Image (tube, rainbow, N blue to C red):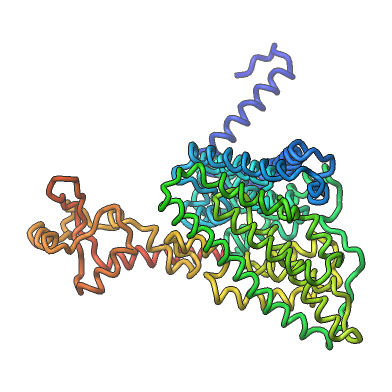
Amino acid sequence: MADPSRPILARTIDQARAAVGDGWHILRTRGPSQIQFWFIALTIGVAAGFAALGFRQAIDGLQAWLYGTGDVQHLHTYAEHLAWYWILLIPILGGLIVGLILHHFTPDGRVRAVADVIEGAAMSDGRVEKREGLASVAASLITLGTGGSSGREGPVVHMAGVISTWISNRIRADGITGRDLLGCAVAAAVSASFNAPIAGALFALEVVLRHFAVHAFAPIVIASVAGTVISRLNYGDVTEFVLATPGSLQFYVELPAFLILGLICGLIAVLLMRGIFLAEDVGNRVQDRLRLPRWLRPGISGALLGAMAIFFPHIIGVGYETTSLALSGAFPLREAILFALVKAVAVSITFGGRMGGGVFSPSLMVGALSGLAFGLVATGLLPDVSGTHTLYAFAGMGAVAAAVLGAPISTTMIVFELTGDWQIGIAVMASVSLSTALASRLVDRSFFLTQLERRGIHLAAGPQAYLLAMLRAGAVMRPVSDPRCAEEGPCREMVEQGLCIEASATLEAAMPIFDRAEVDFVPVILRAEGEEAEILGALYQIDALKAYNRALAATAAEEHS
């Protein structure tokens, strides 16, 4: 019983402290459904927004310090007047630092980015790697600050995933809650990074969660708005790109040209993605053949980038200055084509050398340059029935980026929000729709899903393909103590014939055995080196199918709730 002699203020503080303690206990033991889940979304949104803002400012500060410029928005113009040896040296030093960071803090020397966040959402209850993620953020910061040719959205998205993972672990969130929190963090980070609240929310739903469930929409929007507010408090309500002249579409007559542009941009996006994957494969072969230490690989990539930047400084960093110039029509046809090719090569070298960063911003630049080149040709051939060539740059920017991300909805919105021009939506949507449709047939849906497919993670085909890889034989089997389990004699005979499966194997490996051997069950074993295999139980086909069906039903319930 409270002591009536104590001051009222002291008793109030004690009661508040007890209430907070009870709320935290409920949050940890019962999950966020017992309290205001939207408050958690808001908190994550603020945290992810500040993280994205800090990352962007850190890149600007590092570039300003290394290149000696006070205006990093015009870094490429300033770099044209720097000494060639300085342009060459900065990326080399940056690459060596990146290599050392990834060598010591990741098991495979690989940067974590958007693809790993998508994998975490689908297969790890909304969790991502924390130690490797923080190392990747540091590596990407060094990459972008020292002349690497990539974007900032990849590390920002994974950094947001680290924040949501920490909170999910603290509150012991289940899979649905963990994925929702991950979506909140990603939405806030993208919104804060690009000042694009609508696109941030749609990106989280379309690209990361890959569904538009109603239960996830409200908290993700709240977090996205919070991230945008953080950005606008610092930078103001300004767009990333400012168009010199407003676009105008000569409606019916000119629309077929944007459909053709969409097909061309789809092919360009495929070439960009395949160029990156080819560079990664070549880098792997060269590293293996020459037996290079993995920490040296980003340094070699930095040397190649530095050599290119001496002649083409526009490849340095995110490249928004060149993108803005393309949107304003500042380049002639020859330079637009040349700069697009050089940027694509530089991006491939950056990723092939296992440096950090994302692919979205480079795809914007390649798309704007490609669209400008197409527009110059189109308006030159039919000047009387065409709008401005900058309108084609605008549409090309969205078309290439949408095809690379495999996200036509969120990319269309982010292009609108980056420019603030909403009057030419038909042209952009026409180009985006065809570019995405074409590119998705030539790769595994998107750049990120193709990355995962190359690692043997089959998310592109949907839950029916990857859920089998999430279920372990040891978790579904009937143990030997179960009276319904097969007797040891028949199991031992099957093991001697090689017809068995390890307990750690997944149903993805088990299901083909049932079809090939035409059996109802296979023994599940634990094999120790130099010892006879221990029979732990038997995996029955009917049990595997039931487990698979339950997983499919749970996924469908989440996506339609």
Q: Nearer the viewer, residue 448 or 98?
A: 98
In percent of the image, x 16 and y 62: which residue is there? 498
Residue 486 appears left or right of 312: left
Give residue 222's position: percent from left, percent from top: 71, 51
User: Is residue 191 visible in the rendered structure shown here?
Assistant: no
- Tell me: residue 341, above or below residue 94: below
Spot the residue most to the left.
489
**Horizontal placement of 292 versus 230: left or right?**
left
Q: Position of residue 304 (x, y in %)?
A: 61, 51
| Residue at the image point whose x is 57% and y is 61% from the top | 276
User: Quick check: 282 above or below 257?
Assistant: above
Looking at the image, residue 3 lies above or below residue 351: above
Image quadrant occupied by the N terminus: top right
Left or right: residue 459 versus residue 95 is left
Give coordinates of residue 21: x percent, y percent.
58, 29
At 50% from the left and 55% from the top, the residue drawn is 283
The residue at the far bottom in this view is 253
Q: Nearer the viewer, residue 30 or 167?
A: 167
| Quarter of the figure with residue 159 | top right
Q: Quadrant of residue 64?
A: top right
On the image, the x and y values in percent for residue 239 come to: 84, 56
Quadrant placement of the C terminus: bottom right
